Image (spheres, grey):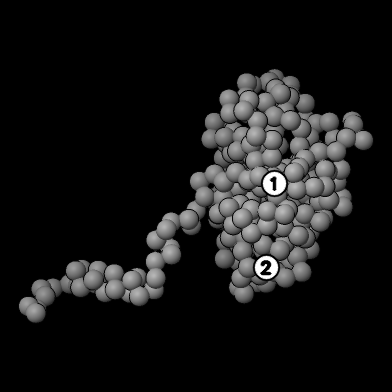
Amino acid sequence: MRFALSLYIAATSAVACLAAATAAVPPDSSPSKGSYERVKVHGRNLEGDSPDRFVSVYLPPGYKSHPNQRYPVIYLLHGFTDSDDKWFGLKPHFVNVPQIADRSMTAGASKEMIIVMPNAYTALEGSFYGKSVTTGDWEDFVVSELVEYIDSHYRRIANRTSRGLAGHSMGGYGTVRLSMRRPDVFSSFYALSACCLDSGAATPPERNTAASSRFTQRNRCGPRRSE
């Protein structure tokens, strides 16, 4: 539960930079409850899977009772092999975003905000939130199509200063990638345990080939012939 809470704290930090959210949220026997919706958003350039993607949306406790209030939005990206229905409590998982958000906002550890997570589980178990001929243009889906849908369907503050991006593992990689490529859309980001940022991934191909050849020579079965 402590790790799950840290994920949500990471998300709140992305948009609000709340120092108070770094502390554990005390239990509350009856926290105010937000509401949850799972909608479908169409992606125009997604390949290999349905272009109509499930998206989980958490609306804060005051959303229904304060109809004139507008809210900042956190776009939260899940990791490889994961999905939004797990993170939002539809299936047993290590984290439950609505429960943690209710506790955090009731305790005053974070301001009220909308939290959005697209389902990026694909036939290959993850999209990596990039542009791919195999899985499609997930970059455009997140930063354009999804943002446009949320802006047109919910009472959000529709500017970059009130949009944050956060993610875990594959979602952490997507967070770094998308925030660097589209700073016009998101004002702040928080990547937690981001994958795929190892500098070794940038090793020139000829060096990888040479290293592989040396490894094969060292590990081939049987005695080597002398040179």
- Crowd rating for badge 1 (residues with CA inside 10 Å; few <14, some 14–19, many 20+): some
Residue 83 visible in the displayed image:
no
Q: Nearer the N terminus, badge 1 or badge 2? A: 2
**Residue 219 image-quadrant placement:** bottom left
Quarter holding the N terminus is top right
Structural distance between the alpha carbons of marks 1 and 2: 22 Å
Q: Is residue 150 left or right of residue 101?
A: right
**Picture coordinates of residue 154, whole percent (x, y):** 85, 46
Label of residue 137 in the image: 2
Q: Helix, strand or loop at disc 2?
A: strand
**Picture coordinates of residue 60, whole percent (x, y):** 78, 35
Residue drawn at x 80%, y 31% as measured from the top left: 61
Q: In the rendered view, would you say 147 is above or below 105? A: below
Residue drawn at x 10%, y 73% as measured from the top left: 223
Which residue in the protein does label 1 denote? 187
Toward the viewer: 110 or 118? Answer: 110
Q: Residue furthest right?
A: 68
The disc labelled 1 sits on which kind of residue?
Answer: Ser
Toward the viewer: 30 or 130? Answer: 130
**Picture coordinates of residue 50, whole percent (x, y):** 72, 67
Residue drawn at x 58%, y 28% as measured from the top left: 22
Residue drawn at x 71%, y 23% as measured from the top left: 108
The disc labelled 2 sits on which kind of residue?
Answer: Asp
Label of residue 211 in the image: none
